[in-house]
Amino acid sequence: MPPPAMLAKPARHNGGTQMHIARRQFLTVATAAAGGLAIGITVPPAASAADIAPEIGIWLTIAPDDTITVRIARSEMGQGTLTGLAQLVCDELDGNWAKVKAEYVTPEANLASKRAWGPMSTGGSQGIRGSVVYVRKGGAAARAMLIQAAATQWNVPVAECSASDSVITHSSGKTLRYGEVADAASKLPVPAEVPVKDPKAWKIIGKGVKRLDTVEKLNGSLVFAIDVAVPGMLNAAIMACPVPGGKLKSFDGSKIKSMAGVRHVVAVGDDAVAVVADKFYQAKTALARLPIRWDEGANSNVNSADIAELLKTGLSATDGLGTGQKIGDFEAAFAGAAKKIEADYATPFLNHAALEPMNCTAMFTADSIEIWVGTQNGDAALAAASEACGLPLAAVKVHKHHLGGGFGRKGQQDVVRQAVQIAKQVPGVPVKLIWSREEDMRHGFNRPVSMARMRAGLDANGDLVALHARVSGQSIFAYLFPNGVKDGADPVTFQGWTTAEFGYNAIPNLLIDYAMRNTHVPVGFWRGVNTNQNAVYMECFIDEIAHAAGKDPLEFRRKLLARAPKQLAVLNAAAAQIGWDKPAPPGVFRGLCQNVGFGAYTAAAAEVSVSKDGVLKIHRIAAATDPGYAVNPDQIKAQVEGSFAYGLSAALYSEITIENGRIAESNFDSYPVLRMEDMPKVETVIVPSGGFWGGVGEPTIAVAAPAVLNAIFAATGKRVRTLPLRYADLKPA
């Protein structure tokens, strides 16, 4: 049957490049409104606390028993943002951490308050650093309101009162608990300006307090989006055209209508079809037997080899280039160099491979749409649901849930649109859409494929006098936000290599440029985005240059980083932790690297061994990071370890390949990730220098691969320049 006419103009599976007016206007207004704190706007409290927990501003409620509920706008996907933001609020509040819990701000409440909680998007390691001003001021304002309420009750000057651990104390010794004055405080005006604490006065910020969501995870009570169960709910499985950009021609639902549990077979947009059944397994089984005809389009004959050839043209291109940095005259300096070094590198497409596949539950009626979803952007989920069903934003209700992994993938709202489009064809019934692992693998927004050509010139003393980095690859912004592409590049093209980030600024002749080479394969933001590939290209090549110059890789970098003290500090910290100045254990070899990204400084040093048969063993990695301020050191260490597991998976095993226009990999048997037995010991050194708020979740992933690759060279004498490592012959030369 042909796709129904009602879905003739769907929101395509393209990451939101075709926005309708309602969503575009909403996001434009929302972005503009995010510039102010707007703390005085009253938002209805959560239903669970409405009757017992008065609001103290919009950021928190305090119940009579002193329970503090902190409202969080960002998303929690394992990175610890929920706990970190609550720490910031609680410290400024002078609250009792043992009494703190957290709840999500709903996107509709944020919209109604003109985004008083700020942007809800959680990515780019912005969860804490992008919210810190708002939440600290919110906690400080609430503390002032509570103290004022107590002072009024005692009829004493505010200056005679102080607060600590949710208790207000008068100079006479009288005390009141927060819960005792919360109701009175909630009736006071929110002060416009309240100074936040000096870091020296912090009591909770900077401490390794326990996460707020651990117990619920351990006892199984935490409900992820995939766990949602709504009364009367049906389940849906979906299949999109195997070739990205292809269309749905027809399907014959009559062939599976008699199968167990099957209720509906519906077109979803113009490129997918879904089966709705009582159980997900029934829907998935029936979908596999559904006769479907696809129009795969012109890309059905594209293979990975074709894409590689396309990228190679960018390595030697002379026009259409985007320029990141240009200092001096590289070509002239390179031509006159005493020694020249050149190397080409390549990294593949990568899937996000989150443990929880894409899913969303939706219920549509004539005048409302309600969704349950784990999303990295609550605002965007609200807008996408409105767009997909044609109802106004005010008719949308979003239930945000923790994410079972996100890594950038769940910032896209394609699954929300699909779930709403399905629910619209089954009105009045909640439908949970779950992507199978195969669908999740084959229809992701992959990390872009890219290649790099690196060239360097040394003078007679072995000093680096000329460096050129040329990247050829696919642009995320060209795929998702074409208007963001400027002068042949997009904002993430030169991550780690911008003037502000690139620490090797002692090089007199520097050229960094980019050749955009786009494919039909969907791409998006992958944990760490372009800084991952760029760090591999630059840090492995810097290592090559050091060896070509006959110099120690650490000392060589130290000289180049002489004008970058923060980068030099983390590099020295990682080197000291690994014991670079001492001999490695017999048969063990070391490599190191450094990088800047997402507002933080990172470095790593790895110890590896390679057997005579070429079997790699990563024994140990020392990682150093300077995020400015360390909100929760324990969470930072966990994040560093997790980022190394993720980054090493990509370096050692993972890749997405293209066969006949479609993604060949379908599950973890063909897209392997790091196993526990392969995970090295990770030693994290936090060197917070203060004065800024940097990221944590993404910066350290960039230094995982180059540290190991450089150590492999030390062990084998071989340079691995194409990832993943599983294809490399590591038998020592």
Image (cartoon, helix red, strand yellow):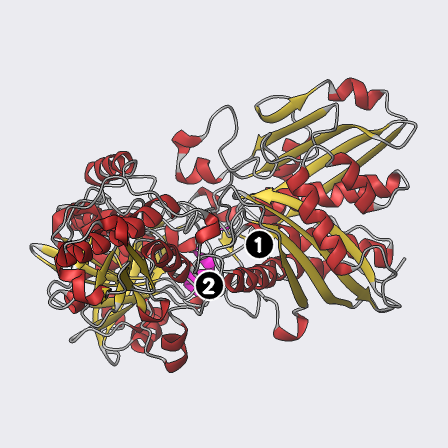
Q: Is residue 654 magenta?
A: no
Residue at x 56%, y 43% (from the top left corner): 597
Q: Which circle, 1 or 2, is nearer the viewer?
A: 2
Q: How many marks?
A: 2
* Residue at the disc numbered 2: 354
Tell which circle, 1 or 2, labels the residue nearer the N-terminal end. 2
Position of residue 610 in the picture relative to residue 63 (left or right): right
Pick out the residue farthest to the front: 172
- Is residue 80 placed above or below 556 in the rendered structure? below
Q: How far apart, in angstroms, are the residues tagged by discs 1 and 2?
A: 18 Å
Q: From which residue to which does the magenta span run? A: 438-446
**Residue at 19% over, 39% down:** 22
Q: In this view of the protein, which residue sits in the foreground, 80 or 645?
A: 80
Using the image as rendered, state which of residue 274 and residue 477 is in the foreground.
Answer: 477
Tell whether 120 sits left or right of 480. Answer: left
Please name whichever residue, 674 or 250, is drawn nearer the observer in this view of the structure.
Answer: 674
Q: Which residue is mark 1?
A: 657
Asked if residue 140 lies left or right of residue 537, the reply is: left
Q: Amino acid at mark 1?
A: Thr
Does any portion of residue 321 appear in the rendered image? yes
Q: Quadrant of the C terminus?
A: bottom right
Residue 531 position within the rendered picture, expressed as x and y whole percent measured from the top left: 58, 44
Q: Measuring from the top left, give residue 443's x and y in whole percent.
A: 43, 55
The vertical placement of 234 against 338, above or below, is below
Mark 2 residue crowding within 10 angstroms, few (<14) / some (14–19) / many (20+): some
Q: Residue at x 28, y 39 (%)?
A: 34
Residue 165, numbered label = none
Q: Quadrant of residue 484?
A: top left
Three-letter code for the amino acid on which mark 2 is drawn: Ala
Element type where label 1 sits in the image: loop
Q: Quadrant of the N terminus?
A: bottom left
Res. 369 visible in picture = no
